[in-house]
């Protein structure tokens, strides 16, 4: 658009953020490569970790998406009380701290969990959650709901006319699947698989708590172990390189598969009468099982944690304070990054790409790299807060941009001519045109960033010493020390804080009723 | 007087030439097949489409080098004329002061424009609470308030029913007459041209013709226009 003079400040802010992110990724990789030359070699266990990383990510993706198909179909075509609540709930695992979910899953599937009680009741041997199936269970817990929501978008894009046509032409269930649902799934499923695969590729906290051992160690976990237990920086660096190589290769391979946004739109969204009989039973069962799988572990976190909240030892509350500091700093950084890249991306393409690839090296790789850089200069423990906040912000940035940038582009496409013809200054344009259209997605993005940061158990474990733990790290230590009562109480606190932070920040920034 | 001097507009393979003038106070329809470049022509005059060559003058002064807000015009688009999060009052007031810092006199002027376009009592509503006709009225209230000598209309009433559209065209005529403004209006309905515009510019085959008498043009249209009118 001619005549819109972009203030140079916007351009330079975007450049600065892009440079910082590039430096973070390449600098960390560079530091890692530099350390990796010192004669360290990868052993059989390390290659096993690489294989396990890819295998569990593939399995997690396939299981999550396969199970999500019947659930999404049921939710798409049935109308029942609590349906919209359930769909909202499907978004919750995304902001749920990993350790909270793990504690909930342990309460259901762990040694003394409900599931094993039930098995014992009918005389079956107990089931052990530790190892590959525990890792998969946790990944499916997180990614089944995510997949359901992604697939639901696919169903929402099937034009109502097609469904009416299928009833008018008397399609049976198979014909309906073949002509309407299968083509839609063929477009949506690859994207969903890719998203889940990429998320699981950098799994750390789940592997740390439910995996481990020679047969269930991910690369991220192996990096941490080489670091923490052997203090073998050279090997940690090689592992980090391997993780980065796999991550970048996967990203390049899968980049083309991201969700297509070209969908046909139907006249209206009134679903035609869904099929009855067997289909009805299948829908009922899929939805019920998915809901139970989601709700029971969370209910267990509340039930088991509640009696122990008041008796929590002071270090837990100190850890909460530390977590709040990290999250506050992280949200501040995220706001700057999102703002600069969104504004910069209105006039050119690169800021979007930089933001989406904000964490192309995995968190542990960046953590390792920063540790290597900081170690000779000072005590890494002093940097724990800043590094964690920065990595958390970079983690949340792609999601933030995905929420804010399309809204910004739409506002710009709809109203920039009007604003130029009226002679709005850049300031007035931002205040009157952009901000009201953006505050809602921006509030959502910042709430998400806060929850992700509060719940993250990642680079902090490389840096923090006793006394500097964040709340998730404290929960993990309590679990490791078999102080399950305190762990349960702390997990409940973590759950409440993460959800509250999300809601408060989203409301504060987004406003109750922003825009029409 | 609006003058286009050997103006050439190019967008990819598409190109449009225009070389004509429009006298002060004239009301001119722009007619032609879709894709012929009607919106491109209006966009060039408004400042959204850069000229490949030639120049545009207003009262002898060159305006094609100025940003849109400094050209002597107000424009109504087909859509998105109102910001959905601002009230009718604020949307109209944008025409007076884009930063919405208004003096008492400003506020009175805004209210007067709102009343004169028949929106009295609706000034606190958001656009989502207005009907299509009321949205058009709010757009026109802003044009009235800005009082620029050139009014550009890029099919702003095309979604309205026939009776409502006639009312809006009459409102445009009233505003233009009172301010002695020149009107350029894109339309695809010859009846609109007959109702509001004594003159018509035909845009077809890469050329924007000089304004000609609307009645005569519609009586015996040139081949390109005849094909379009059917």
Image (spheres, coloured by chain):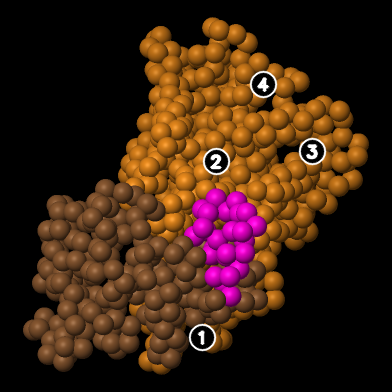
Chain colours: A orange, B brown
**Residue A464 marker:** 4
Closer to viewer: mark 2 or mark 4? 2
Chain for disc number 3: A
Tag 3: Cα neighbours inside 10 Å, few (<14), some, or many (≥20)?
many
Chain for disc number 2: A
Q: Are marks 2 and 4 on the same chain?
A: yes
Tag 1: Cα neighbours inside 10 Å, few (<14), some, or many (≥20)?
some
Chain for disc number 1: A
**Residue A272 marker:** 1
Query: Residue A135: where, in percent of width, then height?
Result: 58, 43
- Along the line of sight, which residue is nearer the eye, A452 or B169? B169
- Along the line of sight, which residue is nearer the eye, A197 or B175? B175
The span from disc 1 to disc 2 (Cα, nearest Å) is 39 Å
Range shown magenta: B91-115
- The image quadrant of residue B178 is bottom left
Which residue is outermost to the left? B223
- Marks 2 & 4, CB-CB < 8 Å contact: no
Q: Is the residue A346 above or below the residue B156 in the image?
A: above
The span from disc 2 to disc 4 (Cα, nearest Å) is 21 Å
Q: In the image, is residue A259 part of the stretch drawn in magenta?
A: no
Left/right of residue B41 with respect to residue A46 in the rendered view: left
Q: Are marks 4 and 1 on the same chain?
A: yes
* Residue linked to disc 2: A396
């Amino acid at each position: 658009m001619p005549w819109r003079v972009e203030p140079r400040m916007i351009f330079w802010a975007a450049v600065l953020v892009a440079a910082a992110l590039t430096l973070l990724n390449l600098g960390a990789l560079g530091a890692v490569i530099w350390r990796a030359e010192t004669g360290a070699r990868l052993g059989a266990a390390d290659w096993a970790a690489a294989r396990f990383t890819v295998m569990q990510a593939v399995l997690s993706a396939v299981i999550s998406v396969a199970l999500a198909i019947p659930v999404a179909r049921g939710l798409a075509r049935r109308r029942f009380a609590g349906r919209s609540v359930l769909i909202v709930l499907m978004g919750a695992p995304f902001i749920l701290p990993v350790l909270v979910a793990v504690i909930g899953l342990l309460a259901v599937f762990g040694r003394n969990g409900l599931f094993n009680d039930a098995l014992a009741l009918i005389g079956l041997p107990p089931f052990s959650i530790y190892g590959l199936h525990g890792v998969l269970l946790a990944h499916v817990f997180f990614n089944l709901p995510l997949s359901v929501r992604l697939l639901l978008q696919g169903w929402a894009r099937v034009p109502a006319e097609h469904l009416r046509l299928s009833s008018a032409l008397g399609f049976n269930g198979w014909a309906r699947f073949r002509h309407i649902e299968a083509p839609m799934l063929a477009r949506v499923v690859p994207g969903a698989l890719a998203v889940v695969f990429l998320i699981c590729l950098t799994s750390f906290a789940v592997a740390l708590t439910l995996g481990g051992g020679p047969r269930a160690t991910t690369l991220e976990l192996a990096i941490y172990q080489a670091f923490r237990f052997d203090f073998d920086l050279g090997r940690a660096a090689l592992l980090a390189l391997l993780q980065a190589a796999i991550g970048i290769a996967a990203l390049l391979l899968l980049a083309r598969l991201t969700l297509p946004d070209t969908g046909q739109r139907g006249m209206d969204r009134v679903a035609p009468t869904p099929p009855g009989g067997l289909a009805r039973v299948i829908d009922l069962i899929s939805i019920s099982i998915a809901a139970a799988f989601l709700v029971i572990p969370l209910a267990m976190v509340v039930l088991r944690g509640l009696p122990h909240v008041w008796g929590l030892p002071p270090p837990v509350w100190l850890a909460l304070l530390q977590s709040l500091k990290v999250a506050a700093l992280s949200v501040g950084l995220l706001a700057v990054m999102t703002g600069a890249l969104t504004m910069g991306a209105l006039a050119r393409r690169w800021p979007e790409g930089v933001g989406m690839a904000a964490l192309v090296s995995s968190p542990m790789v960046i953590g390792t790299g920063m540790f290597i850089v900081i170690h000779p200069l000072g005590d890494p423990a002093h940097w724990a807060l800043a590094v964690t906040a920065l990595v958390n912000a970079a983690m949340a940035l792609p999601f933030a941009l995905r929420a804010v940038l399309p809204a910004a582009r739409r506002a710009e496409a709809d109203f920039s001519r009007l604003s130029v013809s009226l002679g709005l200054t850049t300031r007035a344009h931002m205040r009157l045109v952009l901000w009201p259209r953006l505050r809602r997605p921006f509030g959502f993005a910042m709430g998400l960033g806060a929850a992700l940061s509060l719940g993250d158990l990642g680079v902090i474990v490389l840096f923090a010493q006793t006394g500097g733990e964040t709340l998730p790290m404290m929960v993990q230590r309590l679990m490791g020390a078999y102080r399950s009562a305190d762990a349960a109480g702390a997990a409940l606190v973590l759950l409440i804080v993460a959800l509250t932070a999300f809601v408060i920040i989203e409301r504060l920034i987004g406003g109750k009723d922003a825009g029409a | 007087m609006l003058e286009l001097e050997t103006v050439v507009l190019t967008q990819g393979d598409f190109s449009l030439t225009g070389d004509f003038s429009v006298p002060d106070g004239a009301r001119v329809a722009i007619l032609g097949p879709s894709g012929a470049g009607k919106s491109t022509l209006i966009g060039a005059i408004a400042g959204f489409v850069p000229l490949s060559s030639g120049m545009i003058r207003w009262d002898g002064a060159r305006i094609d080098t100025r940003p849109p807000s400094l050209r002597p015009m107000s424009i109504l688009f087909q859509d998105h004329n109102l910001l959905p999060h601002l009230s009718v009052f604020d949307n109209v007031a944008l025409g007076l002061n884009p930063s919405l810092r208004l003096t008492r006199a400003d506020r009175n002027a805004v209210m007067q424009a709102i009343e004169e376009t028949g929106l009295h009592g609706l000034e606190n509503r958001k656009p989502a609470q207005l009907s299509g006709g009321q949205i058009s009225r709010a757009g026109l209230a802003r044009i009235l308030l800005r009082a620029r000598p050139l009014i550009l209309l890029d099919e702003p009433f095309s979604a309205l029913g026939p009776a409502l559209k006639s009312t809006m065209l009459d409102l445009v005529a009233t505003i233009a007459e009172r301010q002695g403004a020149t009107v350029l209006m894109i339309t695809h309905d010859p009846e609109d041209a007959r109702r509001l515009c004594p003159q018509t510019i035909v845009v077809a085959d890469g050329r924007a013709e000089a304004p000609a008498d609307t009645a005569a043009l519609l009586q015996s249209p040139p081949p390109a226009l005849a094909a379009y009118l059917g």
